[in-house]
Image (tube, helix red, strand yellow):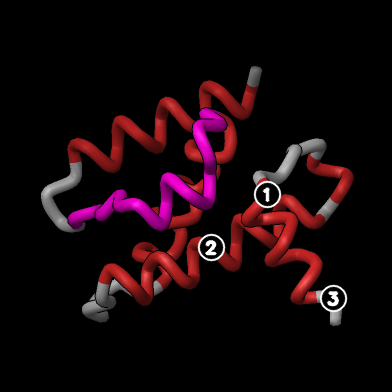
Amino acid sequence: MNRKISIQFITKWMTGTPNYDFVVDQNVLELTKGNDALFGLYMAAMTKVVLEHKGETLSPDQVYQQAENILVDYCANEENNMKPSKKIKKLIKNAKR
């Protein structure tokens, strides 16, 4: 329940902020594969990336890559109880090599 409320808050902030533009493209949709919880966590990861790089201009690809890494790391931690998509499972597996 807390995760859902947090994601709603972040999404509201993202759509209302004039300071940042957030790109959701095919890469994001493939990464989250229709899972609302994964999508919400990805949105939170994008927000984290841009806020940690205030004053810097990051390309959409740079934001995507950093947000993807955050989401993959989150899903890799079993204590977070988040079921990863097939693409995230593959990225977790490749990271362990």
Tag 1 or tag 3, which sits nearer the N-term? 1
| Residue at the disc numbered 3 | 96
At horizontal 85% and vertical 75% (from top left) the residue drawn is 96
Tag 2 or tag 3, which sits nearer the N-term? 2
| Residue at the disc numbered 2 | 68
- Where is 89 relative to 7, above or below? below
Q: Amino acid at mark 3?
A: Lys
Q: Amino acid at mark 1?
A: Lys
* 34 magenta-colored: yes
Q: Position of residue 28 (x, y in %)?
A: 42, 51
Q: Which residues are magenta?
A: 21-36
Q: Residues within 10 Å of mark 3 (few under 14, many from 20)?
A: few
Q: Amino acid at mark 2?
A: Glu
In this view of the protein, which residue sits in the foreground, 93 or 47?
Answer: 93
| Residue at the disc numbered 1 | 86
Q: Nearer the viewer, mark 1 or mark 2?
A: 1
Most extreme residue toward the top is 1
Instruction: Report, in whole angstroms, how far the alpha carbon at label 3 lies from the one at label 2.
Output: 16 Å
